[in-house]
């Protein structure tokens, strides 16, 4: 396990300060606000720690309300909304400075057999044939060194490989609003940490990294890395269809059906390397052009 992955696991290991109240900290402030994937992942950890072990997360719906302050702890308050025979529902409110910054609803289910079908996995190159994130980033001479280092630090726990140039790598020319990224944790999950919820939590963490890239591609924008767009996540929804491992390659196939009114919509499917549809994701975000 890499040092960066161990640091991320430590970040996700929340402190329990009351039965349904948890406290988490943030990563070093490589950006001026808390990374949305972090607060979503930590909120899911908080919810999962109040649910029986035989119930697994199958969906989450969340709203980002305020920018998080990376310099102070985040308190997660869990409401036990429902405990049924098959399903358990939790609501989590993340609080800083006395105000909610994020709210998440998550549903958990006991395993059962049922109807089974899925959309086929789209074509994609083998991840082993693609440049690593660091190789790709260092290949863009137009990116300031400090921007490259911020990217590398923020994503050090994840082996994330773009199939094609990301928005900041080749901007100025509109492209199809579709992008693909392979990802897995930068190291294996073994021993006591190898729990089903952790794989779901780590996928939640990564899911906020690139989902709105397809919005930028449609307009030839490079994003915050080159300063031609200001953006932030507004809401986020995920459905977990089939078991998967976050330390094995997952294909994040992303597209944007619409952008309007200063907002952009991204939707995606995440597949295991052998073609099983593991997760569906939808996110809307603020996408503004600086004046």
Image: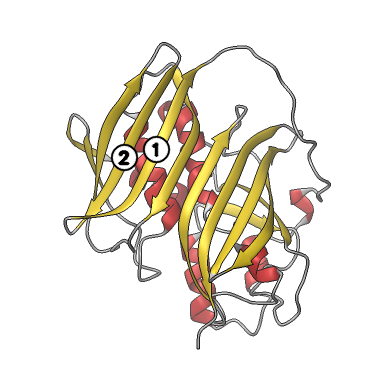
User: In the image, 288: left or right of 43?
Assistant: right
Measuring from the top left, give residue 259's x and y in whole percent: 62, 66
Identified at 69% across, 34% down, the residue is 277
The residue indicated by pointer 2 is: 92
The first of marks 2 and 1 along the sequence is 2
- Count of numbered circles on the image: 2
**Residue 50 visible to the viewer:** no
Measuring from the top left, give residue 107's x and y in whole percent: 44, 29
Quarter of the rendering containing residue 28:
bottom left
Quarter of the rendering containing residue 73:
bottom left
Measuring from the top left, give residue 160's x and y in whole percent: 62, 55
**In the image, which disc is placed on residue 54?**
none
**Residue 237, above or below 106:** below
The residue indicated by pointer 1 is: 105
**Residue 175 visible to the viewer:** yes
Given contact means CB atoms under 8 Å apart, are the residues at marks 2 and 1 in contact? yes
Q: How is the image coloured?
A: secondary structure
**Residue 36, above or below 197:** below
Identified at 76% across, 33% down, the residue is 274
Quarter of the rendering containing residue 87:
top left
Q: In this orientation, which residue lies closer to the viewer: 210 or 259?
A: 259
SS at circle 2 = strand
Q: In this orientation, which residue lies closer to the viewer: 43 or 160?
A: 43
**Residue 113, above or below 212:** above
Identified at 55% across, 83% down, the residue is 144
Measuring from the top left, give residue 141's x and y in whole percent: 65, 83
């Amino acid at each position: 396990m890499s040092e960066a992955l161990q640091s991320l696991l430590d970040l996700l290991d929340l402190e329990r300060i009351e039965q349904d109240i948890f406290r988490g900290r943030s990563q070093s402030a490589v950006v001026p606000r808390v990374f949305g994937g972090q607060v979503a992942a930590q909120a899911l950890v908080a919810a999962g720690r109040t649910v029986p072990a035989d119930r697994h997360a199958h969906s989450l719906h969340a709203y980002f309300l305020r920018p998080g302050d990376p310099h102070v702890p985040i308190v997660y308050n869990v409401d036990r909304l429902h405990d049924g025979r098959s399903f358990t529902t939790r609501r989590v409110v993340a609080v800083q400075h006395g105000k909610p910054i994020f709210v998440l609803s998550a549903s958990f289910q006991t395993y059962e057999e049922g109807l089974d079908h899925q959309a086929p996995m789209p074509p994609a190159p083998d991840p082993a044939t693609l440049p690593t994130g660091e190789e790709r980033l260092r290949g863009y001479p137009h990116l300031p060194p400090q921007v490259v280092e911020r990217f590398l630090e923020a994503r050090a726990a994840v082996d994330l490989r773009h199939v094609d140039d990301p928005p900041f790598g080749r901007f100025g020319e509109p492209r199809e609003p579709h992008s693909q990224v392979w990802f897995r944790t930068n190291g294996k999950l073994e021993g006591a940490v190898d729990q089903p919820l952790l794989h779901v939590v780590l996928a939640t963490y990564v899911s906020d990294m690139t989902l709105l890239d397809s919005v930028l591609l449609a307009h030839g924008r490079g994003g915050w890395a080159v300063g031609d767009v200001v953006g932030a996540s507004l809401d986020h929804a995920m459905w977990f269809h089939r078991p998967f491992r976050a330390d094995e390659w997952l294909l994040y196939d992303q597209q944007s059906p619409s952008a309007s009114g200063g907002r952009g919509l991204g939707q995606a499917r995440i597949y295991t390397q052998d073609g099983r549809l593991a997760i569906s994701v939808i996110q809307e975000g603020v996408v503004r052009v600086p004046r």
